[in-house]
Amino acid sequence: MTTNVLRNRPLWLKLLAALVLLLAALALLLAFFPWDTLREPVNRYVSEKTGRKFEITRRLDVGIGLRGATVKADGIEFANPPWARDPYLVKAERAEFDIRLWPLIRQKVVIPRLALSSPTLGLQLEPDGRRTWALGKDTSDTGTVPVIGLMQVDGGAVDFLAKHLGVDLHADVSYDTSRGTLPLSYRIKGRYKGQPLTAEGRTGNVLQLKAAGQPPFPMEVDAAAGHTRLKASGTVTDFADLDGVEAKFDLKGQTLGALFPLLGIALPETSPYALSGDLRKRGKLWEVAGLKGRLGLSDIAGDMRFDKAGPVPHLAGELRSRVMDMDDLGPLIGLRPTERSAKAVQGVAPPPTITQVRRPDGKVLPTAPLDFERVRAMNADVKYTADRIRNVRDIPLDRGSVQVKLADSVLTLDPLDLGMAGGRTSGAIRIDASKNPADIRASLDVRAMQLARVFPKLEATGNSVGRLDGRINLSGSGSTVANWLGGASGDVAVMSGRGQFGNLLPVFATLVGGDIIKFLLRGDRNVELRCAALAFDVNKGLMTGRTLMMDTTNAVFTATGQANLATEGLDFVVYPEPKSKNILSIRTPLVVSGTFGAPKGGLKAGPLAERGLAALALSAVNPLLALAATIESGPGEDSDCKSVLAQANKPSAGPAAAGAAKAKGAKTR
């Protein structure tokens, strides 16, 4: 009867029953299969396919599932290619890994989990793309690189070498369950980007190299590269791409400029710094929130973003200082930090400081080369504001803000806004580093600077008032501040309307003896300033006076001459013309010569000698007549201030006007 029942079943049911029996038999076969008998064939097969020796030294076991297999190897040795420094890619007491079966059909190796016991790893990357962890004979073929998800180790060592990147690191790893959630500790020593590197820290025991959807694992690091020190703690979700980072960090160093070779972020040279904040990374975007700390003697805070998704990395953010110290600006223009600034940050070895203010050749304009490599390395849009500026010395700055933009190798500071001497200096600076030498343009306007704060000696009299307005429009090519100015063309002007100041300065400038006597007898008086203008046409570094005049109630001063920005030489003659009749006057032109760093002043010998000879001749007749030679008839007259200021306000035609117009193109707003 049973036979009849089976015969009466449909064919498809019979086939299904046969398939189930076959699968059951296959499962029993796989479960009890002596996998270790395949150890030698597997060793030969992998060695042949990869072109290097592979050996499971003691025992092989395999567990088969529907989607993959779990392979357990007791003792494993996998050699590196012959060109590698280390003999083994991996050598371990035990290895256990899960492997996906279906991707093997496409010759792709996917390992969701890899566990190694006491491994030593030898990783090496070559400039031509060869890498020791590529499993094919062509080790530059990225398609033969296995995809590894979770990696678990219980101790061992890792070596990584990439000479063309300046990387040569050795890491020792140890595992201890008593360390709680961070049982895996590591120590790293070697070189990174050509600089000595040491690091130590702890992580969870499972590194998520490629593990989408897995919870983040904890990590701590304390690293030093050169003079840069980093401490960070947080979590990472993807270790291979260093993605899903959430961490708090403390960063110290001698200059932010040192981060360019380490991280590829083109930051300026600065005084020693100490910064902290919250770091986050998602994909190609790095973000720093709540940044705060110090740059030398200045405080700094803000938020920053660094995006590497595009063809050129992009840096953006806003930074602010409550108080910015002038000593910290030196490194921005190529000067070493002052001793105050160099020692301002604890825990950072002070960099070399300023030992002499002037260059050996006596010149003062900065000659530090502008680092155009960094300008070309990335794009940027960063705003910086200093609420107050202190320690200003000879530069009367009060506050400042600047928008720094960098796009396609063109750096612009626009808008640039400085509070200076109670007034305001605003404008833009543009540096096009795509050209060699760079095309540099500066356009700055000066408004309402207080005369007394510009000249502290006047401020000391306590009764100096008045304001200065002016502008700088210069354009040219160069690789340093000095050689740019030495070849620049354009317009420079400073003008002042009515004001007053103590009469001591004009008295000595005109050398009017009668006024000196009156000053000594009656004390200081206020002198009214009717107007003043210093305006220059600049042609390839040569500043020629267009309008050089100051009109006071005592005298009119006019001047002619030149200042050479290339040689830093001065060559001016000042003509004082008193407005009143005085005796004891030796009015004669004044000569200003020397250099920017060592100016010299004196009297023009010709006119002074004439008066001296006249006084000597008259004294031979009657000593009292000698005074007649020093009588000043007072030829000075009031200037047409409106006309003078109009002339000073417009550059002459030619190279100066063309250079000024080109410089004004630096402004985009």
Image (cartoon, rainbow, N blue to C red):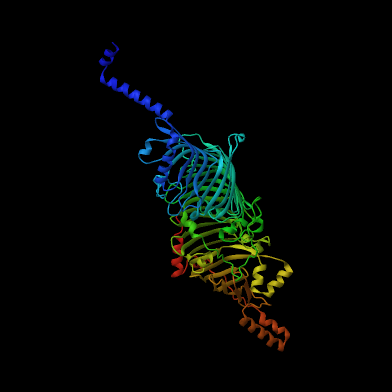
User: Where is residue 430 drawn, in percent x and y?
Assistant: 47, 59
Q: Position of residue 573 (x, y in %)?
A: 58, 75
Q: 21 left or right of 447?
A: left
Q: Residue at x 65, y 53 (%)?
A: 344
Between 278 and 532, which is closer to the camera in this rendering?
278
Vertical comparison of 31 with 200: above or below: above
Say whether residue 233 is visible: no
Q: Residue at x 65, y 68 (%)?
A: 505
Residue furthest toward the top?
1
Residue 298 x %, y %: 62, 51
In the rendered image, the quadrant that contains the N terminus is: top left
Question: Seen in the image, is 276 located left or right of residue 63?
Answer: right
From the viewer's side, name the closer residue of 494 and 386: 386
Q: Is residue 73 above or below residue 468?
A: above
Question: Quadrant of the rendered structure where residue 610 is?
Answer: bottom right
Count of labels in the image: 0
Q: Quadrant of the C terminus?
A: bottom left
Placement of 310 over or under 338, stated as above or below: above
Observer-nearest of 205 and 588:
205
- Residue 18 percent across, percent down from the top left: 31, 23
Towards the viewer: 436 or 143: 143
Q: Is residue 160 visible?
A: yes
